[in-house]
Image (cartoon, rainbow, N blue to C red):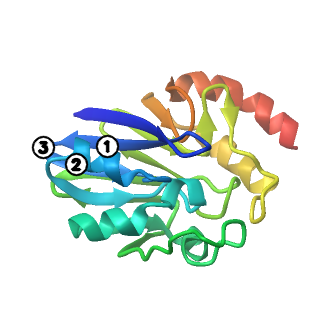
Amino acid sequence: MQIKKQPMGPYQTNCYIVTDNGNDIIIDPGVNATAWIKENVTNPVAVLNTHGHFDHVWSNQEVKELFNIPLYTPKGDLPMLTDNAWVPDLPPSYPDVLIEGEVTQIDIKGTPVTFRHFPGHCPGCSTIEIGEAMFSGDFIFERSIGRTDFPYSSPSEMVDSLQRFMTLDFDKTVYPGHGDTTTIQVEQKNAPYWIQSLS
């Protein structure tokens, strides 16, 4: 499995391309991501969103239509894709598959993908596991967590999510929505600090 990363837009939001079994899975195509994606895929098969904030979904529809591939988005964030009060000029996007449930396992062209729902930063906030990688969006960062002071954020839900995150009994490399990689076990050690800060 190969992973390519490119920070996009003013918030340097990480867009990822995961190549497995000859297929390219695109995660969080942000602002002006399409040109980079075109240059770095040979067989794109799906677009996945970790959550619905504008800087992660800006190029959703453009990429989906360019390659004629399905878009997978957490159900809780569906309203953000078409009605974003923060950014009125956000290009609307329309998912083909809505992901719901605490843990959802899907198969994309022979590649197992697991969504884990960790709300708090926003209602649909999720991580996406492919192989030994966890794409954490804005849930977990290196030595940090997603903000909980945005509209639709919930500090109490973030506490619950962090407590569940601490129970994961495996380790993977974490590829966050902003910044550098970390690991599940490293951030499990940091989670109690954030739980205390939000409680």
Tell me the number on the disc at residue 21. Answer: 3
Helix, strand or loop status at disc 2: strand
Q: Which residue is mark 1?
A: 17
Up-down relation of residue 185 to residue 72 (above or below): above
Kindly check if marks 1 and 2 are in contact, taking CB atoms under 8 A apart as contact: yes
Up-down relation of residue 110 to residue 176 (above or below): below
Q: Is residue 73 left or right of residue 132?
A: right
Residue at coordinates 25% horizontally, 50% vertically from top-left? 38
Kindly check if marks 2 and 3 are in contact, taking CB atoms under 8 A apart as contact: no
Check disc 1: other Cα within 10 Å, few if <14, some if 14-19, many if 20+.
many
Quarter of the image for the N terminus: give it: top left
- Residue 8 in view in this figure: yes
Helix, strand or loop status at disc 3: loop
Residue at coordinates 57% horizontally, 68% vertically from top-left? 90
Residue at coordinates 69% horizontally, 38% vertically from top-left? 145
Q: Of the residues shown, which amino acid type is indicated by label 2?
A: Asp
Instruction: Kindly report the distance in space between the C-alpha atoms of the residues bearing marks 1 and 2.
Output: 6 Å
Instruction: Kindly report the distance in space between the C-alpha atoms of the residues bearing marks 2 and 3.
Output: 9 Å
Pick the front one: 132 or 65:
65
Q: Which residue is mark 2?
A: 24
Q: Quadrant of residue 162?
A: top right
Residue at coordinates 88% horizontally, 44% vertically from top-left? 199
